[in-house]
Image (cartoon, grey):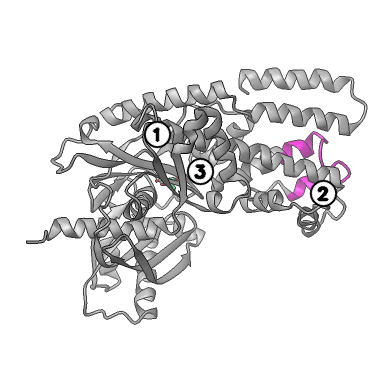
Amino acid sequence: MAEEDQELLHLFLVMEKGMASSRDRSEAFFSYLEKMFSVSLKEMEAFINGFHSEMKKGLSGAESSLKMIPCFVDRPTGSERGDFLALDLGGTNLRVLAVTLDGKRSSTISATHKFVIPKEKMQGTGVVLFDYIAHCIDLFLTEYQMDRGKNYDLAFTFSFPVEQMGVASGNLITWTKGFTATGVRGRDVMVLLREALRRNHIQCINLTALANDTVGTLAAGGYVDPACDLGVIMGTGTNACYRERIGRIGRVKSAYDGEYMIVNLEWGNFDGVARTFYDRILDQNSVNPGAMYLEKMVSGMYLGELARIVLLDLIKRDLILVNEPTAGACFTEKRSFTTEDMSRFEGDTGEGLEKIASFFREKGIPKVPFHERKKIKHLCSILSRRAAGLGAAAITAVLSWMDPQLDRGHTVAVDGTLFEKYPGFKAGMRHVFKSLLGDKAEKIALVHTKDGSGKGAAIIAAVAAAVRSPKK
Ligand code: BGC
């Protein structure tokens, strides 16, 4: 337990001694939780300073918790055009899309199919995973009766840390978000995809570009808005990329024709943030302990799990669901409480908190008193507030790195279910911008860039295709 957590817990235990009712003890424990998960302005500022120093190290190629991966591409100009396929492998789903760019800052998705990735494909061998991807592409081509005699440029949005060698190649550094498929780490994922297409007799695809989802999101944002210089994902995982001056990216040694390049921060791995006792338990129980600390505090894959761990602790201490002997058993299984549940709880604005009641009824706990439902909703808000706050602090860190005085306006393209759907998440972020930056917070436009990763990858494919065959 961190020293500060220990102190707080001690305080709580001392207070608890003089408390007769379990309701008082529970109140006291909730104030303890509030303190434990709150991030003060001073801590946010320290977070930003720490972030800057990790960015600097990462850009120079030194050891850093921020990988700062050069992506060998810049923001689009808006004049890119053509028809492309995009393959989006991110969290729990795989999407195949057909995208048309009109060359006038507008794009349309003419076909799309979402496939669920079964756990055995995520956690089996790389061959099984990539064969499944090829199979999904095959189904898509058939569903939309695409002419297999033609050639289609396909952009692969691969939302994991990849060391890019160029715009169309990159080696997986490590899996995140619960993926563990073997034989992929250290390999070029474009080669693995090409081999899978060959094994599955799909010959009509040119693999044109490889992009992180944040890069796709920035490209999609930049295609419509030239002020967009930051792409952010707040969904199953979390990460960002931004435009950097080539002279500041010491780790790029190969030739690159351009003044700016997009850099993928892989900020989910940032480790300069204080973790609580509960964060540590979550980390130890994860498939990648010791890594992705920020992601584990901020993203949809983990928030619900963190809430479950706290909830279970509260139940064990007899501080919540006190008269329900079966309650503990309902939350012992990993992922028996999800971020979606949290989102539903926080979205329950009804006077009687009926949605929350019905959640517990379905779990076989029919009589959760109102004041306890309110408390559990409050627990969700404690965790989501911290997540939104840390997300906003990370965005502020990147913007102030690019533009220390925030002299110009910045459009931040954001995608991901947490940002899009979680009640109050965006407002929580805005609140932190205001606290950190005062009136300058107005310079930040957070724009939800729906389908950014898919559309944006197509835009990057267009940039790459243009480089391959420049106009005469
Ligand atoms: C991955 C990033 C990705 C982010 C959002 C993280 O787990 O490491 O590459 O951009 O999730 O999908």
State if disc 2 and disc 3 touch (CB < 8 Å): no
Instruction: Kindly state the secondary structure of the residue where label 3 is placed.
Output: loop
What's the residue at 85%, 43% (across, down)?
371
> How many numbered callouts?
3
In this orientation, does residue 63 appear?
no
Mark 3: amino acid: Val
| Residue 115 percent location from the top left of the image | 46, 67
**Quadrant of the snapshot with the N terminus:** top right
Residue indicated by mark 1? 398
Q: Is residue 312 magenta?
A: yes
- Three-letter amino acid code at the position of disc 2: Thr
Residue type pointed to by label 1: Val
Residue that numbered label 3 is attached to:
287
The picture places residue 378, in percent across and down from the top left corner, at 73, 40
Residue ranking furthest to the right: 20
Q: Is residue 51 left or right of residue 385?
A: left
> Marks 1 and 2: in contact by CB < 8 Å?
no
What segment is highlighted magenta in the picture? 311-330
Q: Which residue is mark 2?
A: 326
Q: Identify which residue, 362 or 109, lies in the foreground.
A: 109
Question: Taking 140 as reference, is 462 above or below it?
Answer: above
Quadrant where the image shows the C terminus? bottom left
Mark nearer the viewer, 1 or 3: 1
Which numbered disc flags the more N-terminal residue, 2 or 1?
A: 2
